[in-house]
Amino acid sequence: MAFRADMRIATQVTVSVPISAGMTLNKDFEDAMAKKTADGPTNVDELSPEAAARELRRLGSEIAHHDLLYHQQDAPEVSDAAYDALRRRFDQLAKRFPDLAADIDTTKNVGAAPLEAFGKVRHRVAMLSLGNAFNDDDVAEFADRIRRFLGLSATDPQAFTAEPKIDGLSISLRYEKGLFVEAATRGDGQEGENVTQNVATISEIPKRLRGDDVPDVIDIRGEIYLAHDDFEALNAAQTAKGAKTFANPRNAAAGSLRQLDSSITASRPLKFFAYTWGEAEALPSDTQMGVVTAFGRWGLPVNPLMKRCETVMDMIAVYDDIAAQRATLGYDIDGVVYKVDRLDYQDRLGFVSRSPRWAVAHKFPAEQAETILQSIEIQVGRTGALTPVAKLQPVTVGGVVVSNATLHNEDEIARKDIRVGDHVIVQRAGDVIPQIVSVVTRSGVSRGAPFEFPTVCPACGSHAVREVNDVSGKPDVVRRCTGGLICPAQAKERLKHFVSRNAFDIEGLGDKQIDLFYDAGRIMAPADIFTLAERNSRMADKLEDQKGFGATSVAKLFAAIDDRRVIGLDRFIYALGIRHVGETTARDLAKAYGTFDAFADAANRAAEARPGAAYKRFVALPGIGRKTAETAIAKTVAKAEALTNLAAVGASLNEAVLQLKIAPARGASALAEAFEDIGTFVESARQAEAQFPGEAFLEFAMLDGIGEVVTEEVAEFFAEAHNQTALNALLTHVRVKPFEQLETKASAVSGKTVVFTGSLQTMSRPEAKAQAERLGAKVAGSVSKKTDYVVAGADAGSKLVKARDLGVEVLTEDDWAQLIAVR
Ligand code: IVH
């Protein structure tokens, strides 16, 4: 297999330092260096202590300056050789005058983590994101969902607010007794960075809130942004200085806020809109509109386009109106946000995962642009999936410079017949990864050859295959590397996932460092992260002596690793990188099992109780449900002899199945199509009978939010011996904290498993479920021995019967209301 020259391999590309336009200065720089040192004696032995002190200070600050440009701004001004010359000179002087050099820290800007300088702030109320609506139907569906959840009739009033969605960065501002005391970025939603000093320089943000209804404590939340003309002026000034320009106002605002030097932030005219709140001691109103109006009275900037809407038609009208003004607003917006106006409704609606049920972002349609596809890069993910990525000639799409786009998979490339060199249309919608919509073909213009998708892994050379689904018999859309443990790309991706922000979140250990440490053999598996410091202390080639590191940054890295030796169960499960176990699922699992031991025990038992392929084949037949399939298997085994007799007299499989009532007509034809003859059918059913999922597997799958697909993946992960080994190694260094339920109140039902059945009178089923969960209960879909309560509404059926059979306590809706009211 030969790679095409234009197919760059992501995992093998060495990290190259971006070269700024100023790099032609190298020669001049080196000349200047030579001249400077020539001013005084170059020979270190001849230098006076005063001259040496002067030179050390100058070198120290120059090194720090170049480190800053290289490590933190990705914009070096000098070549590596020139930089090394500076360092060598510094080291020579330091050797001769160690006392003079002792106070000069040349490592302070090393490492790509300028934010280490900011402390962390734990948000008392999580900072969430918003669900999206892309068209009018989605908006109507959002309003309907809320009506259903709250049990409102079609004629009950249901008001919303509508306001622009500002494309900036969200911030939480704490005011105590009306005084601004702290500002924090969103971070991962639970914990952000303390940017108080910098935010204090933003003149639009009042230092004191004025009014007699300002609560003692309130976290004001909103968006920091940069207006278009300020953005243009900033970029012009950057260009004039020869400094890096920003791709769009949002990046510029983010860059301005994350300055270590507040005077830089102060020089950037950042602006702010307040639109919601976190912790608040008492609110000035019982509606969204009322609270935001109070914000305005208190002196906070609020968006003048915010409106109250009574109907979905009103909401769409405001959206159209805001969309029409978009180009002339003077700042970037990317949609309209609708929020339920009544705050008591907001409370009842609560949250799903990371977004409130009571708000949605109605996004503006995607924007498109034409550019050239320069190459197709194949990336290898942590599960071995080969993902094609389009490398584009950079193009501005809706204000953002795009140079990468997803190509999804090989079928997609073939379907759209995308070839390297083609003119293509890229589309960008909100935060979604840009996509290639189509190829622009022009007659008479010749094109390159069709793209050949590699059949071996670009990272390890193993075969890359499209697994054939054992049930449907169709090849999977994804081609995967079969290298498993030997594939360095997969190993690196797993490690990157492990240390990523929502997993172990180790500061100073990002993608770049993982690549570096993996290639150097220092970190090959998660457990190695936690022995890195100890091994380093015994090694001859110490990390602190290597380029790009220094004593300070290495010490910081080791401290950051030590910080993570204790970790929450939800993050830990997520960090394992099990397929289909994203953050929400990891949280659901953590919530359900509480401790790592309980989770691992359940997962191990689920692994032993996994259904086999023969069983799965029956269950997945088209037009057959699980029940029909299971009944058919049982009946086939029981009536094996009768079936064989029918085969002997020449009956077809379809006839035999119908005659012996093994399955109804539709099921019979599906079975007949799937199995060749009666003999193979009987044999398959016998195998399937021995491969039913066991109780432990079904229990796991029955957990709220889990299901069989996830259970299969978790079971498979635990069934692999090498995963167990890696896990055990890891657990000798890491303590997994039991899951802490945020925002749930202690109640009579915490930790209990509840099943709701029948139609409830006082609440909709989803609201009852959400409320029970807020009180710490688990809500299950079906009744088992483990159920604590069954809450039965009118017309309860089989679940009620089962509860009585199993002796599970049955409550009426009133009983339930009383139970949860007693705290
Ligand atoms: S309300 C609990 N209102 O959009 C919901 N968010 O995609 C809190 N945003 O993280 C958000 N303009 O940074 C809200 N008028 C607006 C907004 C807005 C911009 C941002 C915010 C949030 C993100 C969610």
Image (cartoon, grey):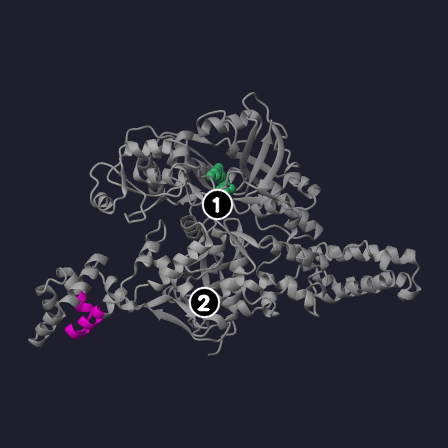
**Is 130 or 652 nearer to us in this picture?**
652
Closer-to-camera residue (59/356): 356
The majority secondary structure of the magenta stretch comes to helix
* Residue 744 lies in the magenta-colored region: no
Q: Which residues are magenta?
A: 671-686
Identify the amino acid type marked 1.
Glu
**Mark 1 near ligand 1 (CB under 8 Å)?**
no
Queried whether the magenta region covers residue 675, the answer comes back as yes
**Which residue is under mark 2?**
384
Dot 1 lies on which element?
A: loop
Q: Is residue 51 left or right of residue 274?
A: right
Residue 442 in view, yes or no: no
Find residue 149 and report its image quarter. top left
Q: Residue at x 67, y 55 (%)?
A: 556
Count the marks: how many?
2
Outermost residue, front direction? Answer: 807
Q: Is the residue marked 2 within 8 Å of ligand 1, measured from its CB?
A: no
Q: Which mark is residue 740?
A: 1
- Tell me which amino acid carries mark 2: Gly
Image x and y of residue 287, in percent: 44, 27
* Above or below for 471 versus 271: below
Q: In the rendered image, which quarter is residue 611 located in?
A: bottom left
Q: For the view shown, which residue lies furthest in the top direction?
A: 212
Q: Which numbered disc flags the more N-terminal residue, 2 or 1?
A: 2
Instruction: Give the answer, above or below, for where 485 lies relative to 406.
Output: below
Give neighbour class at mark 2: few <14, some 14-19, many 20+ (Cα, 10 Å).
Answer: many
Q: CA distance from mark 2 to mark 1?
A: 33 Å
Q: Residue at x 58, y 51 (%)?
A: 247
Where does the image place residue 531, in percent across and percent down from the top left?
61, 63
